Amino acid sequence: MEDLFLLRYFLAGFFTFVAVFYTALILYKKRSHQPVVTMGPTYSCHWWNHLAFRIFRATIWLTSVVIAFYPAAFEYLLPIEWLLVVPLQWSGAGFLLLGFALAVGANFSLGKQWRSGIVNHHDHVLIEHGLYGISRNPGYIGVAIAQVGFFLALPSLFSLICLLVGLAALRKQTQLEEDFLNARYQDRYLAYQHLVPRWL
């Protein structure tokens, strides 16, 4: 029981840290007066994707905090009992850390080009080095790993829905961004696509 007690507090602390980290990063980058977050045109596919991510991020954070202080609330998420194995749940915590580290590493590989969403700005350049020389979407790989980690750490119908919706949203966002990059960079992006895989 002590292990699960620590895991609940780890999840609440982890998602609180992630929320604070990205909020601080966005506020810092806004000092340059460059657009760093965009949801795209209202009701567009890009807009719905971003909205889904925002809702799920907020819901996952709130759920983790509530469960940390009121463990009985976990029952309302419809636990998947056969996955409630302490070592497996802690492996999920490891995946969360690994996914977050990879996503942050990908963000820093982009440097000043980091954006949330598709931002068609005059200073946009194609990044082909660092982690982006290995995969065209290392940040999204990190997010996907973290989503799997959340499901393993807190196996339930709720976390399964979060996982499936999250993976579908990542796939769609990848397609939207590839369409944008193809239109902007044309032959150069086509050459990059042939050289570097979409995932791994």
Image: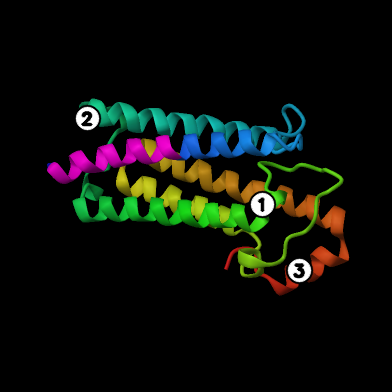
Q: In the rendered image, which residue does mark 1 sit on?
A: 174
The reply to whether discs 1 and 2 touch (Cβ–Cβ < 8 Å) is no
Dot 1: what SS? helix
The residue drawn where x is 65% and y is 47% is 172
Q: In the rendered image, which residue does mark 2 sit on?
A: 71
Name the image quarter holding the C terminus: bottom right
Residue 17 tag number: none
Q: Is residue 11 magenta?
A: yes
Mark 3 → mark 2, Cα distance in angstroms: 48 Å
Q: Amino acid at mark 3?
A: Tyr
Q: Which marked residue is nearer to the observer: mark 1 or mark 3?
A: 3
Estimate the x, y position of residue 65 in percent, counting from the top left. Answer: 33, 29
Residue 192 tag number: 3
Q: Amino acid at mark 2?
A: Pro
Dot 3: what SS? helix
Q: Amino acid at mark 1?
A: Thr
Dot 2: what SS? helix
Q: Is residue 28 left or right of residue 119?
A: left
Mark 1 → mark 2, Cα distance in angstroms: 36 Å
Along the line of sight, which residue is nearer the eye, 116 or 20? 20
Q: Is residue 189 left or right of residue 70?
A: right
Name the residue furthest left.
1
